[in-house]
Amino acid sequence: MFNALVLEQQDKKTIAAIKPINLDDLYQGDVVVKVSYSSLNYKDGLAITGAGKIIRNFPMVPGIDFSGVVHFSEHPKYQVGDEVILTGWGVGETHPGGMAEFARVKGDWLVPMPKGCDGLKAMQIGTAGLTAALCVQALVDHGITPEQGPILVTGASGGVGSTSVALLAKLGYEVVAVSGRSSNHEYLKSLGATQILARDEFDIDGRPLDKQKWAGVVDTVGNKVLATALTQINYGGAAAICGLAGGFALPTTVMPFILRGVCLLGIDSVYCPYSKRLAAWKFALDNLGEDYFKQATTLVSLSDVEQQAQDIVAGKVTGRVAVKL
Ligand SMILES: NC(=O)c1ccc[n+]([C@@H]2O[C@H](COP(=O)([O-])OP(=O)(O)OC[C@H]3O[C@@H](n4cnc5c(N)ncnc54)[C@H](OP(=O)(O)O)[C@@H]3O)[C@@H](O)[C@H]2O)c1
């Protein structure tokens, strides 16, 4: 038996409690991992508080990502003792996740621990950091260079946003952050943002086209904030979009797309193919300085997760939260 955070439903309410479970309770994958760290992502917050319909079958162990050491393997690529990372694939949603001392998953879902990384760093980056790397890489692949102008990052204080700010600044882009929290301005500047704009300026019913300001956008918020950002993207620019912290609607018009050739680049980290995943981990590790790991992440234990989950859903968490098992 080992400890796990277990979510159950009582009277349609989600209840979280640390409980002993055993390996037979887990998904029948071909690799068992002794989990070192998990991390708290927005989706975990929705699952643990029950604020979003992330989990359909209860009881469930949350935790959409984890790092750890292989404890048992029937997969040809992994041997006992190998360090591995998991993000996505429905783990912590439809299969028991990383907020447990052990996880059992398909070996094909894992990636080997990259060179220069360790279990803690991997979860300081976690799903949110990997998604930030995919967003920034998408803008780079679209041909957007630092010379073309600033990049706007929305939801900048959050996990994806803060990591995007740090990555873009390291790559030499001018970064303008959009945040609803004036208390985080200094923090965002310390990560590399040169200017912070209030979320209220974007959370409006704007015009179909506005003055061109941004070479690209990383959007984690959706809804009116994204719609306003789209009206301000330079001719030929793009928005890498991954999130819905402000809602899943997109109240826009065709104007930015047909008159300025603006592109929407949709980003998904959950089912991202293996080779792209490996490249994104390398990209994140190559471009996140030691400062990022000190400034942008908080370490908590399993017993703190429920409170942290409430905070992330309320938009009160800054940066990344890693969970030590
Ligand atoms: N596509 C994928 O594969 C993928 C992967 C990871 C995450 N995501 C999504 O990306 C989004 C961000 O994830 P995360 O882990 O970075 O979450 P997070 O840490 O909670 O960050 C979200 C940020 O958005 C802003 N925000 C919060 N509530 C808002 C509201 N009502 N309206 C506008 N802005 C709001 C806040 O930043 P400020 O206070 O600075 O404004 C908050 O810190 C989530 O929707 C998540 O589901 C998608």
Image (spheres, rainbow, N blue to C red):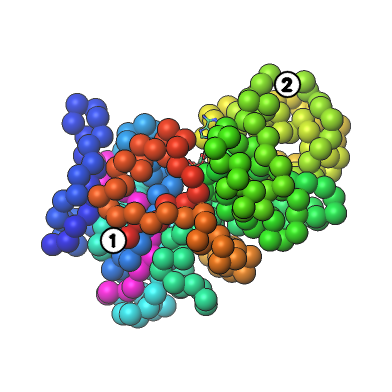
Q: Position of residue 208 (x, y in %)?
A: 78, 23
Label 2 secondary element? loop
Q: Could you give the CA–CA distance between mark 2 and mark 1, rounded to whole angstroms? A: 46 Å
Q: Nearer the viewer, residue 325 or 265?
A: 325
Q: Amino acid at mark 2?
A: Gly
Q: Where, by quadrant of the figure, is residue 27 drawn?
A: bottom left
Q: Earlier in the sequence, mark 2 or mark 1?
A: 2
Residue tagged 2: 206
Q: Specify whether residue 244 is in view.
A: no
Q: Position of residue 252 (x, y in %)?
A: 70, 25
Q: How many marks?
A: 2
Q: What stretch of residues is rendered in magenta?
A: 57-72
Q: Nearer the viewer, residue 133 or 75?
A: 133
Q: Position of residue 18 (x, y in %)?
A: 19, 49
Label 1 secondary element? loop
Q: Position of residue 116 (x, y in %)?
A: 52, 76
Residue tagged 1: 325
Q: Does 79 lie within the magenta span?
A: no
Q: Amino acid at mark 1?
A: Leu
Q: Is residue 71 left or right of residue 197?
A: left
Q: Does 69 lie within the magenta span?
A: yes
